[in-house]
Every structure is written in structure tokens, then in C-alpha cells.
Image (tube, grey):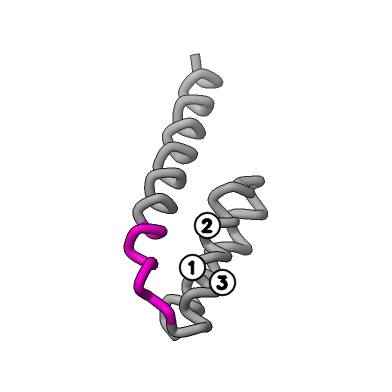
Amino acid sequence: KTVEETAHRLRGELNYFGLSQVAHKARELERLGRERDLETAPQLFRLFNAELSASLESMRQMLDNDRV
């Protein structure tokens, strides 16, 4: 249930920031949580985390470039 609820909240925020690919992974994690099928969740979470980290780093770089 925690996986489902957390992924659901994150999905909305990610869509708000236009991070649709990462939001898609959150939607999949949400589905796995809802179906109580967490066997593939760790692998999917690693992909989710990597994509989110890359997106955040890209945002940081854009902000740094704007300050120069």
C-alpha cells in the first residue's frame, strides 16, 4: 500500500514538472503496489531513480547556466 500511495503522489508532481517519462515509471510502481506484485518493483525503482536523478541534474545545470 505504501508503494502505491507514494508512487501516486510522486506521479502527480512529476507530471506537473513535465517529467512524463519518470511519471510513467511512477505509474508503473503505483500499479505494482496496487496489485501487491512487488517482485519487479526493485528493478523498476532503480530505473525510476536513475531517470529522476538525471532529470534533476539537468534542471540544476539549467539553473546554473541561467545564473551566469
Report the residue at 49% width, 13% height from top.
68
- The residue segment tinted magenta is 37-45
Q: Is the residue marked by circle 1 packed among few (<14), some (14-19), or many (20+) residues within 10 Å?
A: many
In percent of width and height, residue 2 lies at: 42, 81
**Disc 1 from disc 3: Cα separation:** 8 Å
Q: Amino acid at mark 2?
A: Lys
Asked whether residue 40 is drawn in magenta, I would say yes
Q: Which residue is mark 2?
A: 25
**Residue farthest along the top direction in this orientation:** 68
Numbered badge on residue 8: 3
Q: Is the residue marked by circle 3 packed among few (<14), some (14-19), or many (20+) residues within 10 Å?
A: some
In percent of width and height, residue 18 lies at: 66, 46
| Nearer to me, 42 or 16 | 42
Q: Are marks 2 and 1 in contact (CB under 8 Å)?
A: yes
Secondary structure, mark 2, is: helix
**Disc 2 from disc 1: Cα separation:** 6 Å
Report the residue at 54% width, 50% height from top.
22
Q: Which residue is mark 1?
A: 29
